[in-house]
Image (tube, rainbow, N blue to C red):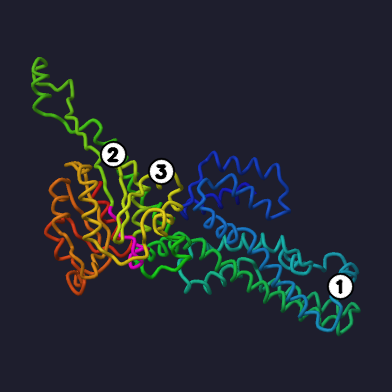
């Protein structure tokens, strides 16, 4: 059991679930104290000791089913069905009693059955499962890479099991029992039962091989799904994808924070100051006994977010706000404002509430601004210019998210110009393609002269790339 726990731990790690050595040891202690007969309790014990992040629970549950309980359940289902079909019109229990009685009457030494044949005859599913796992390991099924190899590794595992020999032995036993007095109907039923058991065995081996393929490719498939989400437009996300996107946002934010942490450690002592080092070591004949490093401090920027929360860009706003607030420690200060036509600050809302609840509150409107009106960027920018322009300085980055669809109102581009003159940078993320900027009621072309960075941003990958440029 300990070997299998270790294998399962390695599978979790390979699939992106972080499990420390201490947590593996906790799992050993837990299973020593609990009954393994109850699979639900067993799963809960492993989950409680091995999983530390809530976002890893779905991955753990899927891998647990692949590695532990689901295969046994499938095996039992296959053999129950085979037993029901193979017995035909005869009572299965009566048939097996007759077989057992006939076997007991055979002369000593005439019953020569392999371990697999004995397990099939007695329907010992626990032993059959063990034999399948051992045969698959000997066949090298852990090297499976794609669907085209399923047939090959299934055949290899069946050969390692000795399934064909076990079938011949059981058929020979049926003939022996027929000659020893077993009725023709019972002998024929036993022969049919053997064929059904062998077919159930083949299906189970293939099922196990498929599960191994899923285990080997689980990390790849999870990465593929995450990459697909990263490149999928915010406009087209389903409710389930919105939920999963929150996990993707957190992973991306953590990645950026990890990179920043490594860079700060590397830059903590700065670069080698060659001029100062040679001067201070002049007394040593120029031999640099004392190394001098030039300190480099990169101050964290301030950030002001102006977020259009009109219905046309609500999803983009949701994830942008979540992403930026996951990165709060990367900035000296973050102030957030939402607008449609009116503009309101939501910084206090994010300090008082959980991030997801705060975002929903900001997007739903009512308490902060009226979100059920028509977009007017000019009015929102003018309100900011009147009330918050003084908060900008040469360390502040202004980040605007919006499609610049102004419903033919005055864009008041001069407000953005004054914001640009006071701030370090003005960055605009527009969910529309650049080919649409300036057409129809879009006033993006009026704002472009006062923007340092203007990027299309309609998915998580584009958003992540822009944030990299801001803070890395």
The residue identified by callout 1 is 93
Q: Is residue 315 inside the magenta stretch?
A: yes
Left or right side of 67 for 273: left
Give the mark toward the camera: 1 or 2.
2
Where is residue 100? Give x, y as percent: 87, 69
Q: Tell me where the magenta segment starts and ends, as one range.
A: 306-316
Q: Earlier in the sequence, mark 3 or mark 2?
A: 2
Q: Nearer the viewer, mark 3 or mark 2?
A: 3
Residue 13 - label: none
Q: Looking at the image, is mark 1 or mark 2 earlier in the sequence? A: 1
Q: Are marks 3 and 2 in contact (CB under 8 Å)?
A: no
Residue at screen point 66% across, 74% down? 164
What residue sits right under mark 2 in the picture?
332
Within the image, what quadrant is residue 452 found in? bottom left
Left or right for 438, reference 337:
left
Residue 389 belongs to magenta span: no
Q: Which quadrant would residue 109 be assigned to in this image?
A: bottom right
How much space separates mark 3 and mark 1, taking CA atoms? 69 Å
What is the count of numbered marks? 3
Q: Is residue 58 visible?
A: yes
Q: Secondary structure at mark 1?
A: helix
Residue 171 vs 61, above or below: the answer is: below
Q: Describe residue 251's horizontal placement relative to residue 376 as left or right.
A: right
Q: Which residue is mark 3?
A: 351
């Amino acid at each position: 059991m300990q070997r299998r726990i270790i294998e399962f731990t390695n599978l979790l790690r390979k699939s992106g679930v972080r499990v420390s050595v201490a947590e593996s040891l906790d799992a050993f202690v837990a299973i020593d104290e609990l009954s393994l007969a109850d699979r639900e309790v067993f799963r809960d014990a492993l989950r409680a000791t091995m999983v530390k992040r809530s976002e890893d629970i779905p991955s753990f549950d899927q891998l647990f089913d692949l590695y532990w309980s689901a295969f046994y359940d499938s095996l039992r289902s296959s053999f129950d069905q085979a037993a029901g079909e193979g017995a035909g019109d005869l009572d299965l229990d009566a048939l097996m009693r007759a077989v057992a009685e006939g076997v007991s009457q055979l002369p000593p030494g005439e019953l020569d059955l392999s371990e697999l044949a004995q397990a099939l005859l007695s329907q010992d599913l626990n032993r059959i499962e063990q034999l399948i796992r051992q045969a698959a390991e000997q066949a090298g099924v852990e090297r499976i890479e794609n669907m085209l190899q399923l047939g090959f590794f299934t055949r290899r595992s069946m050969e390692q099991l000795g399934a064909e020999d076990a079938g011949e032995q059981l058929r020979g036993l049926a003939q022996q029992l027929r000659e020893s007095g077993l009725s023709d109907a019972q002998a024929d039923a036993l022969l049919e039962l053997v064929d059904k058991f062998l077919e159930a065995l083949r299906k189970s081996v293939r099922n196990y091989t498929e599960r191994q393929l899923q285990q080997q490719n689980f990390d790849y498939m999870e990465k593929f799904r995450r990459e697909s989400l990263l490149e999928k437009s915010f406009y087209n996300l389903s409710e389930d994808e919105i939920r999963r996107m929150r996990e993707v946002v957190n992973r991306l934010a953590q990645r950026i924070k990890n990179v920043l942490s490594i860079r700060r450690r590397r830059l903590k002592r700065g670069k080698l100051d060659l001029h100062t080092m040679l001067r201070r070591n002049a007394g040593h004949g120029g031999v640099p006994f004392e190394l001098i490093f030039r300190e480099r401090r990169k101050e964290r920027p301030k950030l002001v977010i102006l977020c259009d929360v009109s219905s046309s860009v609500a999803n983009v706003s949701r994830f942008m706000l979540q992403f930026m607030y996951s990165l709060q420690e990367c900035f000296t200060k973050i102030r957030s404002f939402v607008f449609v036509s009116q503009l309101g600050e939501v910084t206090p809302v994010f300090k008082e509430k959980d991030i997801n609840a705060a975002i929903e509150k900001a997007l739903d409107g009512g308490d902060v601004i009226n979100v059920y009106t028509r977009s007017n960027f000019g009015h929102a920018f003018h309100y900011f210019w009147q009330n918050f322009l003084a908060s900008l300085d040469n360390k502040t980055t202004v980040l605007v998210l919006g499609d610049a669809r102004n419903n033919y109102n005055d864009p008041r581009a001069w407000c953005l110009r004054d914001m640009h003159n006071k701030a370090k940078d003005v960055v605009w993320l527009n969910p529309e393609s650049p080919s649409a900027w300036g057409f129809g009621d879009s006033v993006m072309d009026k704002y472009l002269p006062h923007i340092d960075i203007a990027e299309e941003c309609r998915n998580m990958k584009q958003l992540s790339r822009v944030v990299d440029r801001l803070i890395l």
